[in-house]
């Protein structure tokens, strides 16, 4: 799966690509669709699975 598959808008896709990310982590794949629906999301995952990256991506949608 790619970030494009998550149906993010073009400015966010551009920002993600400029940040050097090609594919979302598993936790991002599972949570971004809910965030795009403006639903609250609580995650629990091991260190290194992309939790902070997800928050960063969410902040890009401002």
Image (cartoon, rainbow, N blue to C red):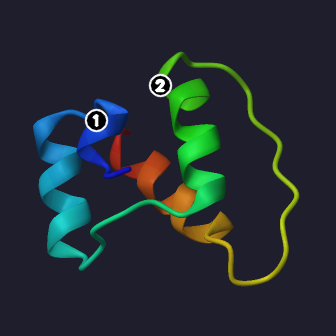
Residue at (38% x, 50% y) in the render: 1
Measure how far apart labels 2 and 1 are at the Cα level: 8 Å
Tag 2 and tag 1, C-beta contact below 8 Å:
yes
* Mark 2 lies on residue: 36
Q: Nearer the viewer, residue 52 or 21?
A: 21
Q: Label 2: state its secondary structure.
A: helix
Question: With 61 as the anchor, is 30 left or right in this view?
Answer: right
- Image coordinates of residue 2 in percent, x first then y, are 31, 52
- Image coordinates of residue 15 in percent, x first then y, are 19, 60
- Image coordinates of residue 60 in percent, x first then y, are 35, 50
Residue at (79% x, 82% y) in the render: 47
Residue at (68% x, 73% y) in the render: 49
For residue 60, the mark is none
Tag 2: Cα neighbours inside 10 Å, few (<14), some, or many (≥20)? Answer: some
- Image coordinates of residue 19 in percent, x first then y, are 25, 76
In the displayed structure, would residue 42 be above or below residue 52?
above
Q: Quadrant of residue 17?
A: bottom left
Question: With 4 as the anchor, is 18 left or right in this view?
Answer: left
* Mark 1 lies on residue: 8
Q: Label 1: state its secondary structure.
A: loop
Q: Earlier in the sequence, mark 2 or mark 1?
A: 1
Residue at (27% x, 68% y) in the render: 22
- Outermost residue, front side: 1
Tag 1: Cα neighbours inside 10 Å, few (<14), some, or many (≥20)? Answer: some
């Amino acid at each position: 799966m790619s970030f494009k598959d998550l149906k993010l808008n073009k400015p966010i896709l551009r920002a993600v690509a400029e940040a050097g990310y090609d594919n979302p982590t598993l936790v991002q794949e599972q949570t971004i669709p809910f965030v795009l629906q403006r639903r609250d999301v609580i995650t629990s995952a091991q260190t290194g699975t992309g939790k902070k990256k997800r928050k960063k991506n969410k902040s890009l949608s401002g």
